Image (tube, helix red, strand yellow):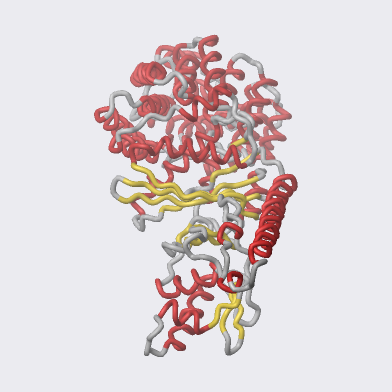
């Protein structure tokens, strides 16, 4: 029987993770509720997996040697609760087998990730009284026994090492990975921002490793609360492995549990639990990323080693404000921000970032968050001249505080591209961002935008392909392949891509350009049903105008201009409706407004 004092705390079986001491049971990152007494029974069974544990042993361990209660009834209830929680069937058991009138046996294979091979049993060998009474040759017999025990120990260690080596050889080489949303174990839904923030920070840390393709937080979040299996998720995201786990904050402490699962086999490869002070949360995330890289045998470059090692302590309250800010910033997709009344989340994000900076003026990440928030306001909600100088100042300050912050370089790249019209400067910033984090979606999207602006369409398509591999759900339709091909005047290719992506807006525009008005109008009729933003409406109106439905286009244009009197709308989009209507004077007037406002 194993020594309870040396057995591992954390064990894995099937989809479950179980702490034998704290009785914490987790399935796919979600804590499973199980009363303490059944947990104690499960702990005994799992701790002796494959062995018969008698009812008498369970009684003695759980209810005590001198118990007088009807433990039979209590034990039966415990087993029923365990089976219900694990989804087990007493008739065809996967986990707990009943040995009639004797006891129970735990059937599932149990893994102890992260544990070293147990010390040889030879360390505990000692001479027994029978050896001492055996006569003059007891020393030689004892020495021979010691020799056999040592040989056995060497063989055990060698066999264990061989199995570990063989397992690593047979394991699929992991070159791509997804961090699934960490489960919030606080019991308070209001703490979701914290769990989501921890997910994003771990994704960002792993993203700095150039030899690894890391799926973005945006795409991974599509699987929050999903019932899909890990192999199904991995196939959809085209990754070799996934990381799942949980996060729990209590006072000034944070606990993260993470496990690495091989996608093709659904096999647990590695698991760890970490608990740190909130001040060291960034160092904790870096440590997790480093250990995952070690486990999957990814060699870190000297620069990557430095980046992962340079995690400064944080002001817990400032860091919390950062997480709340990014949570608000991600609430709506950029396309949704066009819709009136959807700008409150960005305003809240800006307030949180400003709050973080009031608590910690050297918080580079808060400055980068501010830069992105101001930029998105200029794209969807406010005139660029009003907010882009603020975005530029925030991005520059972030880089001044931390030159290795990829997000800040991407932010400055957007400013230089769309506001300063500094093409070489934009290219330098995007290159630097991708050098620091090859898996940063915003940097890939920005660089693709830059390449399109310079009519380097083939390069832009390649960059967009890289973006889609790490973020298949990237939420910017105007940066998608169909619209990119349309802007490059590859209309037939744009139509084919639009059909694949379900983009009737681009299909209508491209068909209009090719002189196929009936098909264009049919596509525009479909597109207008789902178009909510004035920008998309303006593009559909332009397609109607080019296809000959000028009255429809004018009606839509009147509605768009009415909105423009209430809120910022890029003048270029309005001009693109007036031009096919033949009203060049008004088209140029709106283009002049766009130029003065430095609209993108």
Q: Residue at x 33, y 30 (%)?
A: 566
Q: Is residue 276 left or right of residue 454?
A: left
Residue 549, image quadrant:
top right
Observer-nearest of 359 and 481: 359
Residue 385, image quadrant:
top left
Q: Residue at x 54, y 61 (%)?
A: 16
- Outermost residue toward the front in this view: 136
Quarter of the image that includes the N terminus? bottom right
Q: Tell me residue 80's x, y (percent).
A: 50, 80
Q: Tell me residue 18's x, y (percent).
A: 50, 62
Observer-nearest of 98 and 238: 98
Q: Is residue 529 above or below residue 399?
A: below
One can see residue 568 in this view: no
Q: Tell me residue 191's x, y (percent).
A: 35, 50
- Outermost residue toward the left in this view: 358
Q: Residue at x 34, y 41 (%)?
A: 278
One can see residue 70 in this view: yes
Q: Residue at x 56, y 47 (%)?
A: 243
Give the number of callouts: 0
Q: Is residue 128 left or right of residue 264?
A: left
Observer-nearest of 151 and 127: 127
């Amino acid at each position: 029987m194993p020594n309870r004092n040396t057995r591992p705390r954390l064990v894995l079986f099937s989809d479950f993770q179980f702490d034998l001491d704290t009785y914490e049971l987790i399935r796919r990152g979600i804590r499973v509720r199980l009363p303490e007494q059944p947990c104690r029974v499960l702990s005994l069974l799992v701790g002796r997996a494959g062995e018969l544990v008698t009812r008498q042993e369970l009684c003695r361990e759980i209810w005590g040697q001198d118990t007088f209660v009807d433990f039979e009834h209590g034990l039966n209830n415990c087993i029923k609760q365990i089976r219900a929680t694990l989804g087990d069937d007493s008739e065809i058991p996967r986990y707990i087998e009943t040995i009639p009138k004797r006891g129970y046996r735990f059937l599932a294979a149990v893994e102890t990730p992260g544990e070293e091979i147990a010390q040889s049993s030879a360390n505990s060998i000692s001479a027994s009284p029978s050896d001492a009474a055996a006569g003059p040759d007891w020393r030689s017999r004892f020495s021979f026994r010691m020799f056999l025990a040592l040989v056995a120990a060497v063989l055990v260690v060698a066999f264990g090492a061989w199995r570990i080596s063989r397992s690593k050889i047979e394991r699929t080489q992991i070159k791509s990975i997804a961090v699934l949303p960490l489960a919030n174990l606080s019991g308070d839904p209001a703490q979701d921002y914290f769990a989501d923030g921890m997910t994003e920070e771990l994704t960002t840390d792993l993203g700095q490793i150039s030899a690894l393709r890391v799926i973005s937080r945006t795409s991974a979040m599509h699987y929050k609360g999903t019932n899909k299996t890990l192999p199904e998720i991995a196939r959809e995201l085209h990754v070799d492995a996934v990381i799942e786990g949980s996060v729990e904050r209590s006072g000034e402490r944070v606990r993260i549990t993470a496990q690495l699962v091989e996608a093709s086999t659904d096999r647990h490869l590695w698991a760890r639990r970490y608990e740190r002070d909130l001040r060291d949360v960034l160092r904790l995330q870096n440590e997790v990323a480093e250990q995952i890289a070690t486990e999957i045998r990814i060699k870190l470059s000297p620069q990557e080693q430095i980046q992962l090692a340079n995690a400064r302590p944080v002001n817990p309250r400032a860091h919390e404000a950062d997480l709340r800010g990014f949570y608000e910033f991600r609430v709506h997709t950029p396309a949704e921000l066009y819709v009136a009344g959807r700008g409150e989340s960005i305003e809240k994000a800006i307030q949180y970032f400003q709050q973080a900076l009031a608590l910690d003026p050297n918080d580079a990440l808060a400055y980068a968050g501010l830069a992105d928030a101001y930029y998105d306001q200029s794209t969807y909600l406010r005139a660029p001249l009003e907010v882009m100088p603020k975005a530029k100042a925030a991005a520059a300050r972030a880089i001044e505080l931390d030159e290795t912050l990829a997000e800040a370089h991407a932010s400055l790249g957007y400013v230089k591209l769309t506001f300063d019209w500094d093409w070489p400067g934009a290219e330098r910033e995007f290159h630097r961002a991708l050098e620091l984090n090859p898996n940063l979606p915003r940097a890939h999207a920005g660089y693709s935008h830059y390449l399109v602006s310079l009519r380097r369409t083939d390069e832009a398509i390649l960059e967009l392909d890289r973006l889609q591999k790490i973020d298949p759900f990237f939420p910017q339709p105007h940066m998608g392949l169909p619209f990119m091909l349309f802007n490059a005047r590859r209309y037939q290719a744009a139509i084919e891509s639009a059909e694949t992506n379900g983009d009737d807006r681009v299909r209508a525009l491209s068909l209009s350009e090719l002189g196929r008005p009936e098909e264009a109008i049919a596509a525009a009729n479909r597109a207008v049903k789902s178009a909510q933003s004035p920008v998309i409406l303006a593009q559909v109106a332009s397609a109607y105008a080019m296809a000959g439905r000028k009255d429809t286009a004018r009606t839509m244009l009147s509605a768009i201009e009415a909105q423009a009197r209430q809120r910022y709308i890029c003048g270029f989009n309005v001009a693109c409706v007036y031009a096919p209507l033949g009203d060049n004077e008004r088209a140029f007037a709106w283009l002049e407004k766009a130029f003065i406002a430095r609209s993108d």
